[in-house]
Amino acid sequence: MSKLAYSVVVEPLPPDEGGGFVAVVPDLPGCMSDGETPEEALLNIQDAIATWIEAAHDMGHAVPTPSRRLALAG
């Protein structure tokens, strides 16, 4: 399963939260990363996805398959 198969939502962070951008993977609860730019957040989320999947395997948890729908952040 490719880590690139998961949908990622990238949103700006407000200045009082440090600014930059946060990237979240709706299919993987708690999987998120950030970056100074949207591109950096997308690069960083790839490591977070790999780490999330590795941790799930280590704990014997199932890894959700990527959904085909985009979860809208709201």
Image (cartoon, grey):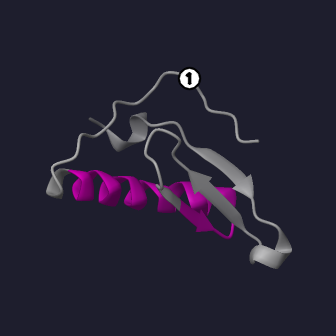
* 24 left or right of 52 in image: right
Judging by the rendered image, the residue that carries numbered circle 1 is 69
Question: 52 above or below 27?
Answer: below
Query: Which residue is found at the position 49% from the left and 21% from the top?
Result: 68
Question: 44 above or below 17?
Answer: above
Given the image, on which type of amino acid does mark 1 rest? Arg
Please provide percent x and percent y for residue 22. 64, 60
Residue situated furthest top in the rendering? 68
Query: Which residue is found at the position 51% from the left and 46% from the top?
Result: 25
Question: 33 above or below 17?
Answer: above
Please provide percent x and percent y for residue 34. 59, 65
Whether residue 47 is in magenta: the answer is yes
Q: Determine crowd level at label 1: few under 14, some 14-19, many 20+ residues with C-alpha closer than 10 A.
A: few
**Stretch in magenta:** 33-56
Q: Quadrant of the C terminus?
A: top right
Question: 13 above or below 68?
Answer: below
Query: Which residue is found at the position 39% from the left and 61% from the top?
Result: 47
Viewer-nearest residue: 24 or 2: 24
Query: Which residue is found at the position 24% from the left and 40% from the top?
Result: 62
Q: Secondary structure at mark 1?
A: loop
Please provide percent x and percent y for residue 13. 76, 64
Viewer-nearest residue: 62 or 23: 62
Q: Quadrant of residue 72?
A: top right
* 24 left or right of 5 in image: right
* 29 left or right of 34 in image: left
> Predominant secondary structure in magenta?
helix
Residue situated furthest right in the rendering? 15
Q: Quadrant of the N terminus?
A: top left
Whether residue 7 is in magenta: the answer is no
